[in-house]
Amino acid sequence: LVSSNGPVDVVTFGEAMLRLSPPSFKRLEQTQSLDVAVGGAELNVAAGVSRMGLRSQWVSRLPDNPLGRMAGNKAAEMGVGVDFVEWDAAARMGLYFVEYGASPRASSVLYDRAGSAAASMDEARFDWETILAGTRAFHTTGITPALSGSCARQVEIAIETAHKLGIPVTYDLNFRARLWSSDAAREIQGPLMSMLDVLFTTEEDAERVFGIGGSDHGEVARRLSEQFGIPTVVVTIRGDLSVLRNTWTAIAYSEGQICDDRVYEIELIDRIGGGDAFAAGFVTGWLEAGVQQGLRLGNALSALKQTSWGDMPFVARREVDALLAGGGTRIVR
Amino acid sequence: LVSSNGPVDVVTFGEAMLRLSPPSFKRLEQTQSLDVAVGGAELNVAAGVSRMGLRSQWVSRLPDNPLGRMAGNKAAEMGVGVDFVEWDAAARMGLYFVEYGASPRASSVLYDRAGSAAASMDEARFDWETILAGTRAFHTTGITPALSGSCARQVEIAIETAHKLGIPVTYDLNFRARLWSSDAAREIQGPLMSMLDVLFTTEEDAERVFGIGGSDHGEVARRLSEQFGIPTVVVTIRGDLSVLRNTWTAIAYSEGQICDDRVYEIELIDRIGGGDAFAAGFVTGWLEAGVQQGLRLGNALSALKQTSWGDMPFVARREVDALLAGGGTRIVR
Amino acid sequence: LVSSNGPVDVVTFGEAMLRLSPPSFKRLEQTQSLDVAVGGAELNVAAGVSRMGLRSQWVSRLPDNPLGRMAGNKAAEMGVGVDFVEWDAAARMGLYFVEYGASPRASSVLYDRAGSAAASMDEARFDWETILAGTRAFHTTGITPALSGSCARQVEIAIETAHKLGIPVTYDLNFRARLWSSDAAREIQGPLMSMLDVLFTTEEDAERVFGIGGSDHGEVARRLSEQFGIPTVVVTIRGDLSVLRNTWTAIAYSEGQICDDRVYEIELIDRIGGGDAFAAGFVTGWLEAGVQQGLRLGNALSALKQTSWGDMPFVARREVDALLAGGGTRIVR
Amino acid sequence: LVSSNGPVDVVTFGEAMLRLSPPSFKRLEQTQSLDVAVGGAELNVAAGVSRMGLRSQWVSRLPDNPLGRMAGNKAAEMGVGVDFVEWDAAARMGLYFVEYGASPRASSVLYDRAGSAAASMDEARFDWETILAGTRAFHTTGITPALSGSCARQVEIAIETAHKLGIPVTYDLNFRARLWSSDAAREIQGPLMSMLDVLFTTEEDAERVFGIGGSDHGEVARRLSEQFGIPTVVVTIRGDLSVLRNTWTAIAYSEGQICDDRVYEIELIDRIGGGDAFAAGFVTGWLEAGVQQGLRLGNALSALKQTSWGDMPFVARREVDALLAGGGTRIVR
Amino acid sequence: LVSSNGPVDVVTFGEAMLRLSPPSFKRLEQTQSLDVAVGGAELNVAAGVSRMGLRSQWVSRLPDNPLGRMAGNKAAEMGVGVDFVEWDAAARMGLYFVEYGASPRASSVLYDRAGSAAASMDEARFDWETILAGTRAFHTTGITPALSGSCARQVEIAIETAHKLGIPVTYDLNFRARLWSSDAAREIQGPLMSMLDVLFTTEEDAERVFGIGGSDHGEVARRLSEQFGIPTVVVTIRGDLSVLRNTWTAIAYSEGQICDDRVYEIELIDRIGGGDAFAAGFVTGWLEAGVQQGLRLGNALSALKQTSWGDMPFVARREVDALLAGGGTRIVR
Amino acid sequence: LVSSNGPVDVVTFGEAMLRLSPPSFKRLEQTQSLDVAVGGAELNVAAGVSRMGLRSQWVSRLPDNPLGRMAGNKAAEMGVGVDFVEWDAAARMGLYFVEYGASPRASSVLYDRAGSAAASMDEARFDWETILAGTRAFHTTGITPALSGSCARQVEIAIETAHKLGIPVTYDLNFRARLWSSDAAREIQGPLMSMLDVLFTTEEDAERVFGIGGSDHGEVARRLSEQFGIPTVVVTIRGDLSVLRNTWTAIAYSEGQICDDRVYEIELIDRIGGGDAFAAGFVTGWLEAGVQQGLRLGNALSALKQTSWGDMPFVARREVDALLAGGGTRIVR
């Protein structure tokens, strides 16, 4: 837990939702109870950054009801500042339902986020100059501009403000086909790319949004970097051995170099938030010691997060450090 | 379980929602799990009617996703026919959250039903003549017309069709201040009143919608009956000894007579659906043997339902009969 | 926990069953899980006696499968000796299902005990002289002879053996109308009565089996004592304020005297096994210091048992002593 | 959910039981709760057929108590018609207990079904001509005739009636060594074989009942087909990589041809009901488009069912179609 | 949720523990699971103050392990600042076990807090001038000085510092007989009394520590106020109707006046933390508008807290305001 | 369940703790409930020996409170005698917290056992001559002498007494680095080695305590045997395929011979207690038929135990025998 006094290290911006999932691999149709968590790509990143030892703020809008308060509470529980969250007396809390799968049944998500407080952004008047003053990085993802036109406009303003203030911008492409089309995603996000310092993506998302794909992930990163003038592009790589067993790694193109890191084999407990944990670890490591440290922290935090329950990473920095130092799979006692 | 072949006895029309409630008196803000049930005033009545031994159909619209299927499944589980439910590929499932209280904290409900499949009724083309053919009663409540203009229009068509076919119409006033104003409720429902055969209400709702209130519940029933020409008006009466201990009874005005019944003292497990269980019992008893039998079945079914979990009454007809025959509070073994 | 070396203080004889009950006042029809406990009148008494500080053995027959082992394990967990339990490779474990009620819905029990190992007693060859050698009391109840003819025969042999050895016999009338008729109960049990030292009954059971009833409980005890020549007859008295709120006390007739004790008001968590806990406390107190101490220990143990979950009393002797010494209802910390 | 008006597509006949299983891989001896499900080979098939889009009826006998009603309710919840279920006021509900295993501990089943309502069939007077009128297939399994002599007689009558009416009969050999011997199974079932249109079996069951085995599963199917004159014989093939990881496929011999299908690798959540889901999928596909479609639907439905909890398949037709269309193991969102 | 930038309104100081309690009224001996909460008198007050709309900091020591982090997280979740918590790499987390009772079994607490990080206070070097700078009140209780000599010394320093800085000190006597004797409590706390602005106590604690008792609670308050020169003394009054049903109110003596407030009747869900919620409400109301508002907010917050689970009050300010405005016990929807 | 009359076969000596673990792979920081079990190396062995059909006693010290009673109860539930357990009115119950992992996150243990009743051994006056009279083996582990100086002294006395009485001593090296250093372990345990009949160890522990390691496990066993003059040394070998998938076997050096056994591949449900189950199986088999049978029973019992929940093995002897006889991974029904 880190003091929230003074400017924080990282500010993130986006929606959080309640996550409702049946226990024990039950299907939604048959369950009599739902496990409750809170998550959202940018909140997850703010939480991961906080767990790794930096200070973070999460900027968003929440309904002023018990569900919205739960989301705010959970952010605070993870050490994330919520000083700039807007409270909406009228709009609803976004929800999503998850059914965890096992081979050959993939996990699946049912979104119920239309009309949420976060999507109803036009009433918000975020003072980005104040919010960003003194921070070391600003992070958001391709989900936020997909929520509504006003959300897209806020993302644009926030990134421009950060850019103007010289604050590095990190951005996860996170394409969501149920929220918008490839065309819309390209049209809205294309102009933002030149203001980014770090872009995170998968090969699939890069292909769907910008038509830059292929099996050579380093080449995908290089092409994105060169096309948009982004100093660092990171491609995360998930291998699906089965629904419950994945591999995870990432590769970066930065300053003309390809950087890579070890591949983790993961016995999946909860894969949701794995990419966000990577981004959180990367941003922390990158602020500490550059791209290679970003990859190492990001991959380790992501691998560990995927072995425990919830969108946000209940992982300690010392656990990440121990894994990086070669910790094995034997019981620790 | 009753065969669903041939025409059913009772048809009901209205929305069902998923009900999400924290276990063990937890507050929403603190819970890590939510109990899941399915309920809705008119579905609850159809279920109660089925449990009491008659055949019922529930007419509604549901989203064509796992949450909608759960609602349809649960209706079928209770023996309710779902042959005329419309499936909507786009709209969402209505939800509501309940926090169960204990004195001095009242139970509270947080609705999240905007944009539901049921409220998006204009696309539906219910063929009421077919649906109602051969049934012995049609039931709906004041919640349905409050959902949307198209819902109100469907209620009007359904009642008119039933009236034209000589099928008795039973109606629960069920005023929901969060859905519409007293003025709107009066304006929309006033014209329907003259087509009703039985009206259920509380004194509070009658006061808020029609300005007919007062501590003499029989007088309220009489005035409603006379003002709108409704043959039978039933006022249900809940006494709040505490949040977890209530009394329950009802009084009817019918053919110039006041009928009443015993007062039940209830150790509340789940009060939601208590009024619907009463209506289900009343309709069953009324079809069997008139108003007095309606009151007796209605009060007994309602009292028993309020001692078990869920909106719909998992109560057997023989349990109702045993209670009416004087069953005590000793363990049965 | 008491050493089981050497002869024990109390031997009991009868069936144990698995108890399966829905959590949270759910009905059987709607539950997705069942809480599991082990109970049976005579096992409950052996457990209570052990908790109060004496040594006990429970004689029975169990199936040699995981369910039977569970029952044996749970007896041992309570400190009850199971050295004389017979293991049956073929017969099934008796079960019962409980639905906990709330006013006006009484709790109810659904037995599924036909064909159980305990009822299949004819194969057993209990050596009662060995089993009873050195014990201070033998206890059984009216449930055991009702299970089967061979069970009735074993009860007869056991009581005769105890009588012959000068070991006091305590007996709970425990009439179960679903197992046998009043006539059969009278015919089988009548001849046993003269060999008893203590008879426990309710007024209702005495009326149904022996036609000795009435609102004066002391008078019922006196008449039973005199008619059958039983030195001590105890009538337990449960007052049903509501399904979840009872009173409890007992009255004894012994050596021409009526003894009584305070009345406990109980917020019921689990009333099943309340009578058995009383018998266990009575037997313990009676062996310690006679009838009055029996009533005091019995009532206190029973009242405490009814506030926690399970048939067997997870109550400590020191808790009973503290209650008898005037412990209040304030939190202890 | 499919309308149950008019004749259904598939009628099945057999017993359902309550399934009681400890959560979280606990052993029966140690569990304090049991998960509750309802299942039975023929009910599972009726449920699967309904989920795949056809209409089905399940014919059986159930006790007229809460446990029996639960079974009937759950059939209805899955969209299965229960119009011809007989209700028995006296007999008990069959139960079975399951302990889920992990290598090297196999899962195991403890049956407690003796004396069940379904086995007490002699009182039933099923009017098979009425029941089967207009249906497209009748399905039962080798479990039903093993339950009792009267059950065997009912199976014989039902198959003869179907045969006479020209309704195809599908039959799963499902040998249960705890219910009868190989000799009895052969003696009773041998004469039925010539009336079947489709026989489902494993190689092991064919070997044990008819002495037709071997590692060439297609050859087993061919020999069964030719020996008994069954038009289509399907052999299901489960590969045990470990207790929690299996492969699944099936092969058919029909009209002189061997048909096969892809092999699914399954991360097992609940293998019980996997064969029934296959049969349900096969029957549906076979009625739609013949043997090859039967194999495809059967294998896909079975693989998906084994990844979720319960005997009956909470799987949607669109999920089966998506898997057949090449759906991967990535999260769907 | 309130911004934690700048000085806070209220600082509290004391230990938090993990609370472990069996669900569903089970006894510790029989439970297979324990519910987990975090609580401690002074943390509870900081949480309540935050919920009521003021900003708070909680000063304490926690072990630097997952259990300590959980406590810090939960404080943050409630909006409490944890900037001055000391982290101890060696000491353990204090625990306590609770068994919830029902009449006649009182609830009971088993402490396991010896050797906790909070009790190992001598290593801490709290800079009280910095911590208290700008705050409007400092609160601690009689539990803290009872933990260890160094804790007592820290309490003394903190109170002296607050007194010197002109910051009001509020103090809950909270006598814990298991931690120290009446003599020690009087000796250590007596000298602190003259520096207090508000003292909270029960009549029983005042009697045990200072020998000032009696049934006239206002008189007890007056005598404490006059003897020690404390401007405001508040006596909280709990009436034990039964273990599950209490009354609650409080009376204050301030500036020569007795103030009282309405008596709440409470259906107890969790009484632990009821006194702390009162103190939190009182401090908030007292800072807002003086003693009478303190009583009103304190009693309402306490009554509401006792109806939900956990030591800390998951109650919203608007719920308190609604109760004060006359909210009833009817369901809110 | 085995009669506890007369001398037992195996006596064990050591501490038991409450084990608290979050369900469903949750982290401690995020859990709202903890699963409760009781375990400890020597209790686990006594339990395993009892499950395999021999009689056992477990000697220890427990606090005289509900947590201590739970531990004693659970020992008795497993058929373990607790006649010589000492009850301590003052000391606390040792606890440990477990987080179950999944690759790449190893499971981890957080001990909270300082100040436990078992470690406070100096007050105990175990009469080892009486305790050991007539037993066939005495077992303890390297954890017990590590707890405190008085514990080490008791271990020394017990082993010397057994040695003097000609009772075989079996000893598991079980090095716990958090309890003592390698130097202390060697210094205290070195002198005991010559009195042992069987030593169990892993290669890692032998290396850390005695500097005897290497990849040739048989060679490690031989060197330990020869250096200390221990007749039989057994090295257990766990292969970590992943956190959730291990292999298990053991190798013994005895009378100049190396014995080995098959390797089990295990889908881990709960690995804690795996080594203790091995020791229990080995001791049982060794007493039955020597070292080879010891290895066979030990490996099979250990493999089965690791597939179910809890420290103590809820495994039946017949399950072990069935596995040894070649039982497969198919469902047993």
Image (tube, coloured by chain):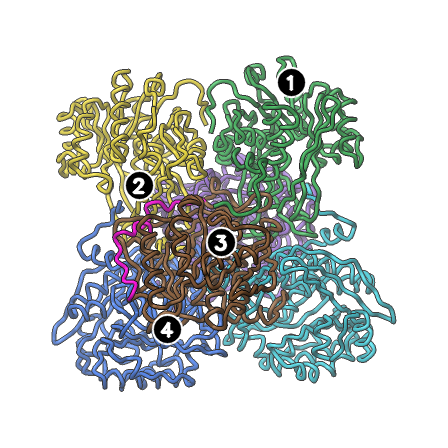
Chain colours: A cyan, B blue, C yellow, D brown, E purple, F green
User: Dot 3 lies on which element?
Assistant: loop
Judging by the rendered image, the residue that carries numbered circle 3 is D272
Is-magenta flag for residue F272?
no
* Any part of residue E71 in sight: no
Disc 2 to disc 1, how far (Cα)? 55 Å
Residue position marked by numbered label 2 in the rendering = C114
Which callout, 1 or 4, points to the residue nearer the camera? 4
Q: Quadrant of residue D167?
A: bottom left
Same chain? Circles 1 and 4:
no
Residue type at the position of mark 4:
Ser
Q: Helix, strand or loop at disc 2?
A: loop
* Mark-to-mark CA distance, 4 and 2: 40 Å
Kindly indicate whether the residues beneath marks 3 and 4 are on one polypeptide chain.
Answer: yes
Residue at 27% over, 53% down? D88
Disc 1 marks which residue? Answer: F157
Mark 4 crowdedness (10 Å alpha carbons): few <14, some 14-19, many ≥20: some
Q: Is residue D119 magenta?
A: yes
Q: Is residue E31 visible?
A: yes
Q: Amino acid at mark 2?
A: Ala
* Whole-percent x, y for residue F216 in the image: 79, 34
Q: Nearer the viewer, mark 1 or mark 3?
A: 3
Q: Is residue C173 above or below residue E42?
A: above
